[in-house]
Image: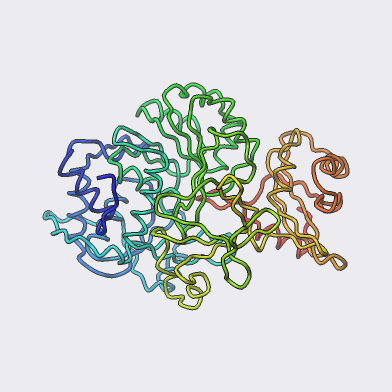
Amino acid sequence: MSNLKDNETILSRIQYYAENMPDKVCLIDAISGEKISYAMFWSGILRYAKSIQSDKYYILQTRQTIAHLIAFYGIQVAGGMAIPVEATVSDERLSELGKQFDAEILPVEYRLSNEEAAFTPPDPERVACVICTTGTTGKSKGVMSSFRCRFCGADNVRHSYELTSDDTALIPQALSHSGGLRRLEAMLVCGGTAVIMGAAMLFGNVFGAVKKYNCNILQFVPAQVAQILSRAEKLLLEVAPQIRIVSVGSAVIPEHDKERLRELLPNVRLFNDFGSTEAVGSAYFEWSAYSPKPNCVGKEGLHSKIVFLDDEGAVIENSSRNHPGIIATEGGTLMSGYLNEPELTAEMMRDGRVLSADLGYRGEDGMVYILGRRDDMIVSGANKISPVEVEDAVLCVDGVKECACVPKPDKVMGQMPALFVVWRGDALPPFELAEILERKLDKFKVPRPENIYELDVLPRTNGTGKVLKRELKERLMKNENV
């Protein structure tokens, strides 16, 4: 079952394993300890489907439980489209989403039928679910994900990590977001076991689950890695002998965090992945197999191809750091469009590609490198400044815990780099930090002391831990130095 077939879907894989290895543990709820086999999981999905039998859009509040996943896939079997949202969403927001997507709010605890629905394999191009974007660059959008898209995104993970049915992965991420859901579905594609526990930051619970369920694959977002390295290195080392892979995705992982993980886990395969909700899991980089390659996101997955476009939409054949392009993805992992937003869909999907908000290039090593978001790129006079380059330099300064570089309006230069820094202990004076950075960066890239701000924490999204740079830009527009 390792090769893609024309009609292959996540549902068909669950059915296959339910019939061919029915007693294999499919899912484990790390909090409650509940376990379910592939056969029991498939039966629950079919019984849930029998209880609704409708082709509507359904909003589900994600509670990181097996019951949620039975509902999520049961809706798909019934011919409906599932829209998972975070459990913490307010009633008012739920009502807004219902109106925005013309969707019915369905409780996860919907009573299962005593009978199983008949399963008709779906058209791979039909929409399976709608994933809400995090809203880091504006309002949340509903990304329509087809059965083919879901399968190809998961199979990219399976192929890149060489997953097998013997693997058990801990997935401490919200299943309402693309990253956590893709990692879960990769385990369903390979017939492995997924241990779910939500966007956890209580690392005693995280590593306790790793030990208890003998997990050999850990999947984190960068914010979780940063917290582990500052508070829980000892716990990580205790489980290191049983770990085969550590994967980090959903945002760029700082280079110093990569190198620290390399030091702590010399016998573990370390990956980061690159993609978006609109182009699921496009590229993968096993950084532990190479000398440091700052800003590298690796090579395309099995079902993806990345190209670089100029401002007119033409492909740049020889992209480079000095001649980057808009990163665009082709292949089977692309969204079907934004729900109820045809104009926005047309803007983001062109010529069979999904355009990203990122600039990048292909290096001489054949790998993809990212320079940052197009709307984050700082245009200062005649110079273009990559925030990622500035942030990497800042994170190498002793005492810096995390940082974010964003453009600040300037009457003379148009924009100047502004820097928000979170310190581990005592902060350096801004002028001293600027002097250190001048030894690492071209002078025009160094934020002026008056544009360096200290924060206790950076604003982040709840589910993926991405930095909300939009909020930082808004503070600058309002002249808030907090």
Give the farthest residue toward the bottom. 343
In the displayed structure image, the side of residue 391 where residue 331 appears, left or right: left
Rendering coords of residue 48 (x, y %): 21, 56
Rendering coords of residue 89 (x, y %): 46, 58
Image: 305 above or below 31: below
Rendering coords of residue 1 (x, y %): 24, 45
Image: 361 above or below 432: below
Find residue 35 and report its image quarter: top left
Q: Residue drawn 42% across and 64% down?
A: 335
Give the farthest residue toward the left. 115
Find residue 98 and report its image quarter: bottom left
In the displayed structure image, the side of residue 119 where residue 475 appears, left or right: right
In the displayed structure image, the side of residue 179 where residue 482 appears, left or right: right
Q: Residue drawn 57% across and 69% down?
A: 314
Q: How is the image coloured?
A: rainbow
Rendering coords of residue 393 (x, y %): 74, 42
Q: Residue drawn 24% across and 59% down?
A: 7
Pick the front one: 2 or 197? 2
Pick the front one: 255 or 425? 255
How many callouts does the rendering have?
Answer: 0
Q: Residue drawn 68% across and 42% down?
A: 402
